[in-house]
Image (cartoon, rainbow, N blue to C red):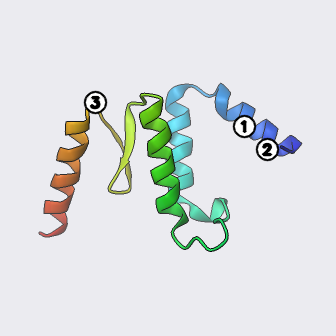
Amino acid sequence: MGASRDWLFNTFLALPWERAYDVLEYVADNPGLVPPPPGNRDAVAQFKRKANGVLEREHGGYRFVNGILTEITAPAEIEEITHAAGRRSRL
């Protein structure tokens, strides 16, 4: 990694946990900040899927659910939020 990337990586790792979530949410909401991989039209969705994988692996208390960073406590809660969001979108 270059010096700038090292600085950003180290700064991110030093953040309090709640600020790290703010950064994840900011990057997801501002897709122009990170160029998409070649041939990837849906870089934001891919970012959120990968972030969810890391959050799940690390037992994080948040997940991207229907595109929104949401506090969760159990897989059943994610399912209920997803279901409710689907009902609301049909109203």
Question: Helix, strand, or loop for circle 1?
Answer: helix
Question: Helix, strand, or loop for circle 3?
Answer: loop
**Residue shown at 79% from the left, 44% from the top:** 5
Q: Do the residues labelled 1 and 3 touch (CB within 8 Å)?
A: no
Residue 65 appears left or right of 41: left
Residue placed farthest to the right in the image?
3
Q: What residue is shown with label 2?
A: 5
Tell me the tag on residue 9. 1
> Is 15 drawn above or below residue 8 in the view shown?
above
Q: For the residue marked with disc 3, what is the amino acid?
A: Thr
Q: Do the residues labelled 1 and 2 touch (CB within 8 Å)?
A: yes
* Among the two numbered marks 1 and 3 on one chain, the one whose residue lies closer to the N terminus: 1
> Is 86 drawn above or below residue 79 in the view shown?
below
Question: Helix, strand, or loop for circle 2?
Answer: helix
Query: Which part of the image, by quadrant, shows the N terminus?
Result: top right
**Residue 12 x, y percent position in the rendering:** 66, 34
Q: How far apart are marks 1 and 2 (CA)?
A: 6 Å
Tell me the tag on residue 73. 3
Tell me the tag on residue 75. none
Q: How far apart are marks 3 and 2 (CA)?
A: 33 Å
